[in-house]
Image: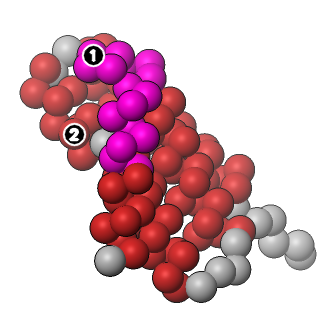
Amino acid sequence: MAVAIGGTLGSLLRYLTVSEGDEKALFLVNMFGVAVAGFIALRLTTSELIRLTLIPGFAAGLTTFSSVAVIHVQENTVRDVAYFFSSVLVSLMILFAIKPKVKS
């Protein structure tokens, strides 16, 4: 139930903030979802219920990474493939920035 509630809220937020064909907004929403999931997974100590609501629920409902991959690879233009790979690269950069630093 927690995943369903979070997913509903994330999907609704994506629907309200990204209009069809707006690749810039889609990219920003996807990166925000990565940041939310990364911050919760890497920085917060919270209950399993909250984690389920916010990571596989809200963040997964908010992001559309699988759709981005399929749509852009189907088009198969250099621009679309670059969009896909930049999504991966920026996602990794966000998670690296969020990850707690280990002191030696």
Q: Say if 40 sits above or below 46 in the image.
A: above
Point 81% across, 72% down: residue: 102
Mark sitting earlier along the chain (1/2): 1
Q: Which residues are magenta?
A: 10-27
Magenta segment's dominant SS is: helix
Indicate the quadrant containing the N terminus: top left, top right, bottom left or bottom right. Answer: bottom left
Residue 22: say if magenta. Answer: yes
Other residues around mark 1 within 10 Å, as few (<14) / some (14–19) / many (≥20): few
| Residue 77 x, y percent position in the rendering | 20, 15
* Amino acid type, mark 2: Ser
Secondary structure under tag 2 reads helix
Q: Say if 66 sits above or below 85 in the image.
A: below
Query: Which mark is drawn over residue 67?
Result: 2
Disc 1 target residue: 21
* Amino acid type, mark 1: Gly
Total marks shown come to 2
Residue 85: say if magenta. Answer: no
Secondary structure under tag 1 reads loop
Indicate the quadrant containing the C terminus: top left, top right, bottom left or bottom right. Answer: bottom right
Query: Which mark is drawn over residue 79?
Result: none
